Amino acid sequence: MKKYIVSALAGAMSLAAMQAWAADAVTLQTKWVAQSQFAGYYVALDKGFYEEENLDVTIKPGGPDIAPEQVIAGGGADVVVTWMAAGLAARDKGVPLVNIAQPYKKAGMQLVCPADGPIKTEADFKGHTLGVWFFGNEYPFYAWMHKLGLPTEGGPDGVTVLKQSFDVQPLIQKQADCISVMTYNEYWQVIDAGFKPEDLIVFNYTEMGNDLLEDGLYVMEDKLADPAFKEKMVRFVRASMKGWAYAMEHPEEAGAIIIDNGGQDENHQVRMMTEVAKLIDKPDAKLIPAAYERTAKALLDQKIIEKAPEGAYTTEITDAM
């Protein structure tokens, strides 16, 4: 009897080892450092949702010198989180990225200006300095300025563009009349710096109808020709959205998980998660075609991309979830 038990136990351990060995590896490159902007992926990893889908997922955090489009083009990731403007711009330049899922339904980008400053409306932009991040984050801003007919090379008839640092110092130190912020991150850094909401003039891209799609999931087009890869991505997106749903329901726990993975300031991460949930809305990762068309048109109008993109997204992954 003892021999049977030992044999059965050894067999079970062998099966578990085989299952662990057989897990499909997926490397995800995020757009920025570990923070609640990417909470769904970290939660899915922490809660075992990827493991349930037989996936061995590695999350590579981004940073100021990391472009997800370059990472995946170089073979350093299977899937990346990036903004659609950056994805389409990369595709236009020969990096065949395809959007396979769109967790963020709304944009979080804003421009904020001190209420006691010279800018009260869009008509006041002319002749002033506006801050925006680069590395692909500048495209929505340039599309907006193009829509207003404002040159971005400076001068009295246009605006001077400040290549903004990834903090709010340009506003505090009065290096710019307005700076770019995200609803879930830098806006609250401005508030924490001593500004009150009534001290700010806020231009919200979504409310103005200038929003371009932000955090989506992208893969290389040639990979989608492999049915096994597509099936793996179905499992990856399904588990990721389960992570997002959990994070939205448990923002405090999500914030703690981010801290465990290198994030900073747990209170800020919890607050960020609450704001991110508003942008995700329904965690189904389905791309809204009208939002895609608006994004592509804005980039074409601004000549950020030279030709209308074809095959830049697929719904096959989310349709199969």
Image (cartoon, rainbow, N blue to C red):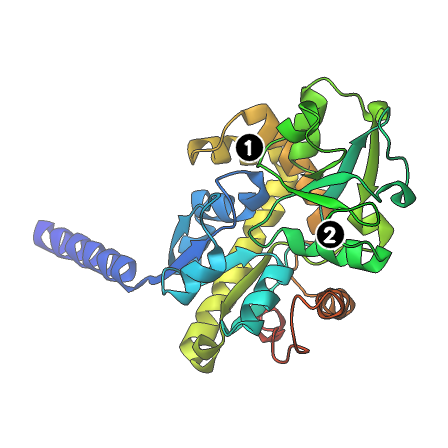
Closer to the camera: disc 1 or disc 2? 2
User: Where's residue 318, x and y in %?
Assistant: 61, 68
Q: Earlier in the sequence, mark 1 or mark 2?
A: 2
At 26% from the left and 56% from the top, the residue drawn is 16
- Pick out the residue farthest to the top: 194
**Can residue 182 be seen here?**
no
Query: How many C-alpha atoms fall within 10 Å of the one at disc 2: few (<14), some, or many (≥20)?
Result: some
Q: Amino acid at mark 1?
A: Gly
Q: Amino acid at mark 2?
A: Thr
Secondary structure type for disc 2: loop
Horizontal side of 50 relative to 161 (left or right) equals: left
Determine the image quadrant of residue 175.
top right
User: Where's residue 2, x and y in %?
Assistant: 10, 49
Secondary structure type for disc 1: helix
User: In the rendering, which numbered label is found on residue 255?
Assistant: 1
Q: In the displayed structure, would residue 234 be above or below residue 110?
A: below
